[in-house]
Amino acid sequence: MIARLVGLLGLAALPAWAEVPVQVVTSPGGVTAWLVEEPAIPFVALEIRFRGGATLDAPGKEGSVVLMAGLLEEGTGELDAQGFAAARDGLAASYRFAAGRETVSVSARFLSENRDQAVDLLRRALVEPAFAPDALERVRGQVLAGLQQDAKDPEAIAARVFDRLAFGDHVYARPSDGTPESVAGLTVEDMRAAHRAALARDRVYVAAVGDISAADLAPMLDRLLGGLPAEGAALPGPATVGLNGQVEIEPFPGPQSVILFGHEGIDRSDPDFFAAFVASEILGGGRFGTRLMTEVREKRGLTYGIGAGLAQLDHAALVSGQVQTANATVAQTIEVIRTEWARIADIGAEELEAVKTYMTGAYPLRWDGNAAIARQLVGLMLDGYPPDYPEKRNGYIEAVTLEDARRAAARVFDPARLSFVVVGAPEGLEPR
């Protein structure tokens, strides 16, 4: 049965996007989902997101939502972790639970013939998790092991320093996985509190793709989610981005340095967003032919790869990027990045058309298969886009004129505010 499901996952590729319109389905209980119905392959991909994630950790309980999400597959009712895994495998179903900075994510895949049983087992995991003490200790150990690894990882260190610099006392500055001290102190009651805070119907987004109709999906949503609280914890407020030209150095031994860089960005609701999106791809799309890759890698050989782009959070917007280089070339690399940042508004007509062709051509590749489509759809729901966005998105890119791109680039990319976090032993670089 498991092999059969794996085979179906690989075969479940839908036709071109324009041929698979989204249906908006609302359950009798008020849960809304986006559905792409495809009965040709007898399986369903379900993606569920709860807005809030680790930003809902109570003060002093950092890491509680991440740890709670890791326990959802560790047993429910009379089923312990092994019993839950056996029941899941017996249905040839697949469940994945995870939490990040702003979401708790649930991914489910199941065969049409086992849909009712697979949905019921998933419901039990979401609504009635056991939070058994032995499971808590086991998953806690896994989280603590990850934190120990992060303490030795310059990229993880750079991310923590960058978040502190960017977000100050906002919850975005807290580590999503917590600290060794906070995670060590979490209790079963903390898990129940995190569950009540994070998994609620007032913040749930659902996308379903595959062999299920709107008539079947609507009542299924209430069976699956109706037992969750109507409301969860309050979401955080807007974050102020405090990146104003700083250079922060975090000493770390080794021959190379990790560099994160950026400043405040542009909200996706801004009229200049798509023009800025196109300009950011020209600057730092992370592929050969983009300006940063050309200047930093191809011309000067300072790195193997560099990328930068717009980063959208629920309560803040950034322009950010990352690169690694030898300690002796950190200062030179930063200078090149600053130079390219300052001249991005000087976009050429051919350069603009080339990047628009790339962006519109690459977009359909994201929609390859039921699972990928479900992930894309639930992401669009979270971002506040309408159901017809996938059909219109390339039109927004194509509509960006040279004047638009230059104006947005000049407005959004500010070399004076461009800030750098360097983790390593850089030579000839002073903090500021």
Image (tube, rainbow, N blue to C red):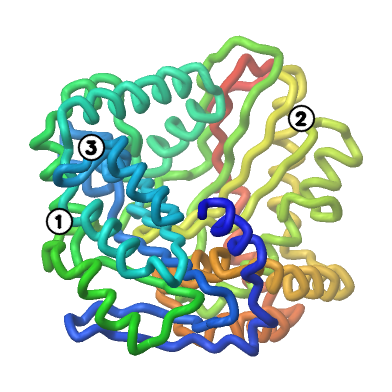
Q: Position of residue 82 (x, y in %)?
A: 31, 35
Gap between marks 3 and 2, in whole Å? 56 Å
Identify the mark nearer the N-term, 3 or 2. 3
Q: Nearer the viewer, mark 3 or mark 2?
A: 3
Q: Are marks 2 and 1 in contact (CB under 8 Å)?
A: no
Question: Which residue is label 2 attached to?
Answer: 332
Secondary element type, mark 2: helix
58 or 347, nearer to the observer: 58
Question: Which residue is label 3 attached to?
Answer: 80
Vertical placement of 225 versus 140: above or below? below
Indicate the quadrant where residue 171 lies: top left
Q: Position of residue 236 (x, y in %)?
A: 23, 55
Q: Position of residue 74 (x, y in %)?
A: 28, 38
Q: Residue at x 62, y 32 (%)?
A: 259
Which amino acid, by three-letter code, is at mark 2? Gln
Which amino acid, by three-letter code, is at mark 1? Ala
Gap between marks 2 and 1, in whole Å? 46 Å
Q: Nearer the viewer, mark 3 or mark 1?
A: 3
Q: Residue at x 42, y 70 (%)?
A: 113
163 or 349, nearer to the observer: 163
